[in-house]
Amino acid sequence: MNRLLQLIATTSIVVALATNAQAEELVKEFRGTGNTTTAIFTVDDPWLLDWRLDGDFNALIALDVTLIEAHTGRHVGRVLHTKHKGNGLQLFTSAGRYQLRVSSTLARWTLKIKQIQPEEEERYTPRSAN
């Protein structure tokens, strides 16, 4: 009986991990140290920008990321501005074909575009502290 309970628990964990892995799909990953405009990527609603900023200095680093509509070149808006090492997630609710315009100073950056399922959107919505 103990072995059966252990098998059921293990199976539940594997199923939960597999379900979570399917909920998030890597669309594109961009890495760099300078200024660039990324390749075009296509996303459905909703999607995430998963970013990381690192560098050799604690000060003087900066990262600016602007979202560009790929077909028209229209500036959609600045989606990230930081002068500190770190990482984070940004949720987007507009499907489309986009590019990112990246400007950085003394920094190493990684930007991952991740497709998520609509039912997962709530998980990434900012909440106020109570």
Image (spheres, rainbow, N blue to C red):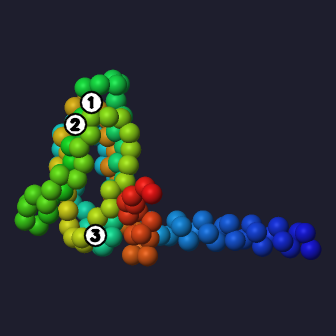
Quadrant housing residue 1: bottom right
The residue under the point 20% across, 62% down is: 98
Q: Secondary structure at mark 1?
A: loop
Compared to residue 21, the image places residue 119 above or below, namely below
Quadrant housing residue 70: bottom left
> Residue 62's x, y, as percent?
24, 34
Task: Specify the farthest residue to the right.
Answer: 1
Compared to residue 86, the image places residue 14 above or below, namely below
For label 2, count other residues whose C-alpha is less than 10 Å away and answer few (under 14), some (14-19) or many (20+): many
Residue that numbered label 1 is attached to: 61
The residue under the point 70% across, 71% down is: 12
> Residue 71's x, y, as percent?
11, 67
The residue under the point 33% across, 66% down is: 47
Can residue 48 be seen here? The reply is no
Residue that numbered label 3 is attached to: 93
| Of pointers 3 and 1, the one earlier in the residue sequence | 1
Q: Are marks 3 and 2 in contact (CB under 8 Å)?
A: no
Q: Quadrant of the C terminus?
A: bottom left
Q: Are marks 2 and 1 in contact (CB under 8 Å)?
A: yes
| Of pointers 3 and 2, the one earlier in the residue sequence | 3
Q: Is residue 54 left or right of residue 41?
A: right
Image disc number at residue 104: 2
